[in-house]
Amino acid sequence: MVARILAVEDNPTQAKILDLLLRDHYTTVVVASAEACLLRLQQEAFDLILLDVNLPGMNGYEACRRIKADSGIRHLPVIFISVNCSNEDRLQGFDAGGFDYLNKPIVKEELLRKIAILLEYQEEKLRMQSHADYAVSTAMTAMTSAAEQGLVLQFMKASFACQHQKDLADAILHAVRQFGLDGIVQIRSDYGIWSRNAEGGCTPLEVSVLANVCHAGRVVDLKQRTAINYPRVTLILRNMPTEDAERYGRLKDHLNMLLEGADARVMALDMDSYLAAEARRLLDAIKSISETLVGVSRKTQELHASYGTVFDAMARELETCIPLLELNRHQEAMLDDLLREASEAYVALAGQESAVDKELMGAMESLQKIAPQRHPTLGDPAGLRP
């Protein structure tokens, strides 16, 4: 692209000479005053300014100072042109912000060489500035991304402290606000559904929107809104920066990581609730079995006492009736032997019943030892209370 040069020269002859020297190499515009120069700079874009020092009205030094004070054009390099090239003149040009000084009468080769050097320098400066801007932008993006990843890690840590699905939903919204976003979230558990916004529970319309969106794809753009879905979690964001493709993509990646962790935490809470229910069922079963064993032991003892009473009464009755039976000695001896054997058998059975009682008591103690201990989560399962 051909460079555009703005030359400021009030002398018509010198202006014509400048135009003739430059027209074959550059696009040149010549004006006769500093005021016209400043006005033209606001209207058109140039790559370099050739500025006469001795101008009517505002001189070249003042014009250069105004150019350098304007943030929109301060980057333009200025070469002063003057018949006065003393050290004092050059210092004034340097203080005003000029890049070089050219003495009149103008020598074509010197003019073209200085312009070429200056334009090459300016191009290299712009290239280096572009690289520097890119490096700064890359560094800022990396730092921003690291900070956003830190927010995801903070949420992961906080999610482990959530013992209820509602608390987890609120933790998701808190993390979303840390990203500078606003939204609504729904958690779908085996034990209920929780829909939350920044103020608390969602409105019926918000619940309806969440219910309709949750069956869509993983990431769904809805005009100014973005929905992110996982099997147990749906998040709808109202102000995703869709106009900033880089930040938008980065936020989607971070929020996907966040919701993947939240989805896993919902599954863990459901498992806690399931284990809590199973623990309570097991405790109830152990309690029932223990009560049954106690009842069996008590009834066994009662039966044992009843058997003993009946046997003793029968033995006394036999002792009373034997003399009335008019038995001979041999028959009485046989009957006594039978009673003695029955008594010994009864005593043996009583010992066996005592051993059975001990076994029952041992079984109850074993059940009590294996019964699940009360757990802060499993003992009062939050997931069972929608």
Image: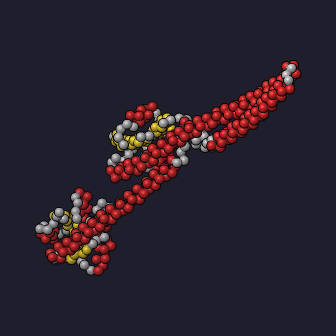
Colouring chosen for the image of the structure: secondary structure
In the rendered structure, the answer to whether residue 71 lies left or right of residue 298 reads: left
Q: Is residue 157 visible?
A: yes
Q: Is residue 280 visible?
A: no
Question: What residue is rendered at 36% in x and 47% in y?
Answer: 241
Question: What residue is rendered at 55% in x and 43% in y?
Answer: 163
In the rendered structure, the answer to whether residue 246 lies left or right of residue 56 reads: right
Residue 118 image point, x, y percent: 23, 71
In the rendered structure, the answer to whether residue 62 lies left or right of residue 3 reads: right
Residue 365 image point, x, y percent: 68, 41
- Image vertical order of residue 100 relative to residue 185, above or below: below
Tally of marks: 0
Q: Hey, which quadrant is residue 65 in on the image?
A: bottom left
Nearer the observer, 194 or 98: 194
Q: Hey, which quadrant is residue 275 in on the image?
A: top right
- Image vertical order of residue 227 relative to residue 27, above or below: above
Nearer the observer, 280 or 132: 280
Question: What residue is rendered at 72% in x and 35% in y?
Answer: 353
Question: What residue is rendered at 44% in x and 34% in y?
Answer: 207
- Image vertical order of residue 153 relative to residue 366, above or below: below
Residue 291 image point, x, y percent: 67, 33
Nearer the observer, 217 or 364: 364
Residue with the most extreme bottom position: 87
Nearer the observer, 152 or 138: 152
Residue 83 image point, x, y percent: 21, 77
Quadrant where the N terminus sits is: bottom left
